[in-house]
């Protein structure tokens, strides 16, 4: 009876090493139905950008001067779940600024008065805190005309010391 057990241990060890080296273990730990929020920054036009679409990240880094900045994010639902709301994604061509909000009032105001248009939704987020949820902190820099979002309280505090105003209304992402 020992041999099959040793074989099983060796087999699953190999799977573990394979999963760790290929990164699939991390993906496997994503909450069901949720995908990672990817983040990049363009220092020239000063724009933080968030998407779940890896091709979009590739395009913007290859051709539009965006780069990784190490912003902390989390996971987001691609379809509506109980107690979640859409996180709208807006863009202003004139300001070269992406902004995100769960508030239809903020969205409509930005469209009618501030020159933004709705590009779609990033995904669906909880509006209340709970187990496995990460607050997605929103910051706005009126001088640089940029919106910045992070799940890290340290990154939020650093930004707040450097001219960014903390704003709410982006809900809760999920931790891996
Ligand atoms: C992802 O982005 C690419 C490049 O912009 C686009 O062609 C594609 O339609 C997007 N996929 C989804 C699911 O939105």
Image (cartoon, grey):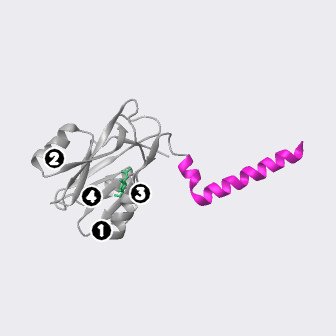
The region drawn magenta spans 1-28
Secondary element at tag 1? loop
Count residues near mark 4 (Cα–Cα under 10 Å), then give few for <14, some for 14-19, many for 20+.
Answer: few
Of mark 4 and mark 3, the one earlier in the sequence is 3
Quickly name the residue at label 2.
110
Vertical relation: 162 (above or below) 129:
below
Q: Position of residue 30 (x, y in %)?
A: 51, 45
Residue position marked by numbered label 4 in the rendering: 161
Q: Earlier in the sequence, mark 3 or mark 2?
A: 3
In this orientation, does residue 69 appear? no
Q: Main secondary structure of the magenta part?
A: helix
Using the numbered discs, state the Cα–Cα distance from disc 4 to disc 1 in whole angstroms: 29 Å
Q: Secondary structure at mark 4?
A: helix
Q: Nearer the viewer, mark 1 or mark 2?
A: 1
Magenta span contains residue 110: no
Marked residue nearer the N-terminal end (4 or 2): 2
Q: Earlier in the sequence, mark 3 or mark 1?
A: 3
Q: Earlier in the sequence, mark 4 or mark 1?
A: 1
Q: For marks 4 and 2, give the one nearer the viewer.
A: 2
- In the image shown, does 45 or 136 lie closer to the viewer? 45
Q: Is mark 3 within 8 Å of ligand 1?
A: yes
Q: For residue 54, which numbered disc appears in the image?
A: 3
């Amino acid at each position: 009876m020992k041999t099959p057990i040793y074989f099983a241990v060796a087999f699953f060890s190999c799977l573990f090493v394979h999963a760790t080296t290929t990164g699939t273990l991390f993906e496997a730990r994503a909450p069901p139905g949720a995908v990672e929020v990817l983040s990049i920054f363009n220092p020239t036009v000063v724009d933080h950008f968030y998407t779940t679409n890896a091709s979009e990240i590739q395009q913007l880094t290859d051709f539009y001067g965006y780069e990784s900045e190490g912003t902390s994010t989390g996971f987001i639902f691609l379809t509506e779940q109980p107690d979640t709301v859409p996180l709208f994604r807006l863009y202003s061509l004139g300001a070269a600024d992406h902004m995100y909000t769960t508030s239809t009032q903020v969205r409509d105001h930005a469209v009618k008065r501030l020159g933004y248009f709705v590009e779609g939704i990033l995904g669906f987020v909880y509006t209340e805190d709970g187990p496995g949820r990460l607050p997605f902190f929103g910051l706005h820099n009126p001088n640089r005309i940029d919106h910045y979002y992070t799940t890290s309280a340290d990154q939020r505090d650093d930004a707040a010391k450097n001219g960014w105003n903390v704003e709410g209304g982006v809900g809760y992402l999920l931790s891996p």
